[in-house]
Image (spheres, rainbow, N blue to C red):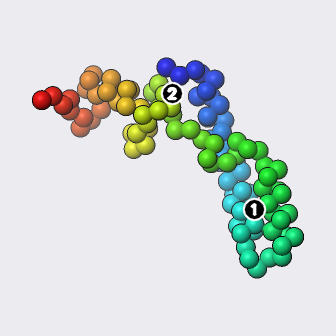
Amino acid sequence: MAKKSATEKNKRRRKMVDKFAEKRAALKAAAKDETLTLEERFTARLKLAELPRNSSKTRIRNRCEVSGRPRGFYRKLKMSRVALRELGAKGLVPGLVKSSW
């Protein structure tokens, strides 16, 4: 089980990404726009740098919904391999059959 502080920090980051998504996208588009002057593009970059770092989408860590584990994460199921195995053994994951040979 992951530390509660780590999972809560990640939740705050997700909220912040949602909050600043439109503003960040507009500034990125302005910074890449070749039709604008060099000064306007530079000011867009400066404003982008002033935004909180945690508002960047790359700061989000994929964590298991069940245990909070950051590694061995399956995106489709939003859980780690360990949690998937445990729930699958209990028969709680539909369509998952234990393999043995």
On the image, the x and y values in percent for residue 79 come to: 42, 34
| Quadrant of the image containing the C terminus | top left
- Density class for disc 2 (Cα within 10 Å; few <14, some 14-19, many ≥20) is many
Hey, which quadrant is residue 89 in on the image? Answer: top left
**Residue type, label 2:** Gly
Left or right? Give the position of 70 relative to 18.
left
On the image, the x and y values in percent for residue 73 come to: 43, 36
**Residue type, label 1:** Leu
Residue nearest the observer in this picture, 15 or 27: 27
Q: Secondary structure at mark 2?
A: loop
Residue nearest the observer in this picture, 37 or 16: 37
Left or right? Give the position of 5 relative to 78.
right
- Residue 26 visible in the current orientation: no
Identify the disc placed on residue 27.
1
Left or right? Give the position of 101 relative to 22.
left
Q: Is residue 48 above or below residue 71?
A: below
Residue nearest the observer in this picture, 96 or 42: 42
Disc 1 and disc 2: Cα gap in Å? 33 Å
Q: Residue at x 78, y 55 (%)?
A: 48
Q: Secondary structure at mark 1?
A: helix
Query: Mark 2 highlights which residue?
Result: 68
On the image, the x and y values in percent for residue 78 come to: 44, 38
Residue nearest the observer in this picture, 64 or 58: 58
Earlier sequence position, callout 1 versus callout 2: 1
Hey, which quadrant is residue 72 in on the image? Answer: top left
Q: Residue at x 18, y 31 (%)?
A: 99
Q: Is residue 27 above or below residue 18?
A: below
- Residue 98 visible in the current orientation: yes
